[in-house]
Amino acid sequence: MLQKITETNQDHVIKRVPARLKRGSQAKQVFAGEFFRVWQWPQELYDGSVATFESLSRPDTVTILAFDSEGKIIMTKQSQPGFTEFWSLPGGVIDDGEEVFAAAKRELLEETGFESDEWYFLFCGQLNSRIDWANFHLVARNCRRVTDIAPDAGEKIQVELIERAAFEDLLRRSEFRNSDFALWWWRGGEKESDLV
């Protein structure tokens, strides 16, 4: 069941899931790039030997399943340097020190020009077993267009309003970028939640 989000309850409703691979107590950061950090630690194995384990970390992200007042799903068709063109739910990187809820509202407005007063927490997942990267999924209902889109310099975005049947077809396509959302949907997540 969806949990409504407000400014006052967001810290109780929105929960980050931990990384799948727990770093050892002796983990040290050995590299920091523009986006990724590399961690290493000694890990005792089942036979008593020790191996060096590694993991990455990167900024967390938000993904928004947004509906307009007619129940159409707000999608983006995007181009970014180095990637083939893709379809995506609105969303992006949570800025350093930014709250998840604030990031979701900002990304929805920047990428689509829509805003909403009706927000819900859907789920949070870790996308990879060796990368500490939480992706927070939120639902925004009754969205209204209030401004033009304001994409980042590395984004070309086209906004599309899609009916549910076309959305389900899109979920099956390789150009749909949000594979974690698609997996949740096809495992029955959409049946567990009153999305619209």
Image (cartoon, grey):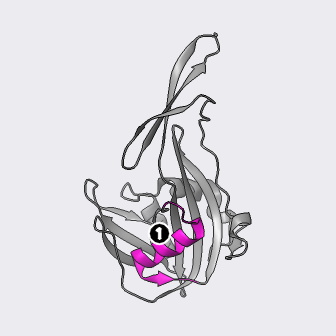
The reply to whether residue 73 is in sight is yes
Amino acid type assigned to the residue bearing label 1 in the image = Phe
Percent x, y for residue 165?
Answer: 49, 71
Q: Tell me the residue at 40%/74% (across/down).
A: 111
Residue 51 horizontal side relative to residue 46, left or right: left
Q: Is residue 158 above or below residue 187?
A: below
Residue 110 horizontal side relative to residue 22, left or right: left
Percent x, y for residue 113?
Answer: 42, 82
Q: Is residue 182 above or below residue 36?
A: below
- Write the start and end of the magenta stretch as one range: 96-116
Percent x, y for residue 169?
Answer: 44, 64
Nearer to the camera, 2 or 154: 154
Q: Around disc 1, counting alpha carbons within 10 Å, would you say few (fewer than 14), some (14 to 19), or many (20 or more)?
A: some
| Position of the N terminus by quadrant | bottom right
Mark 1 falls on what kind of element?
helix
Q: Quadrant of residue 49?
A: top right
Residue 6 colored magenta? Answer: no
Residue labelled with disc 1: 167
Q: Tell me the residue at 68%/67% (across/down).
A: 193
Q: Is residue 21 above or below residue 151?
A: above
Q: Tell me the residue at 53%/17% (across/down).
A: 51
| Position of the C terminus by quadrant | bottom right
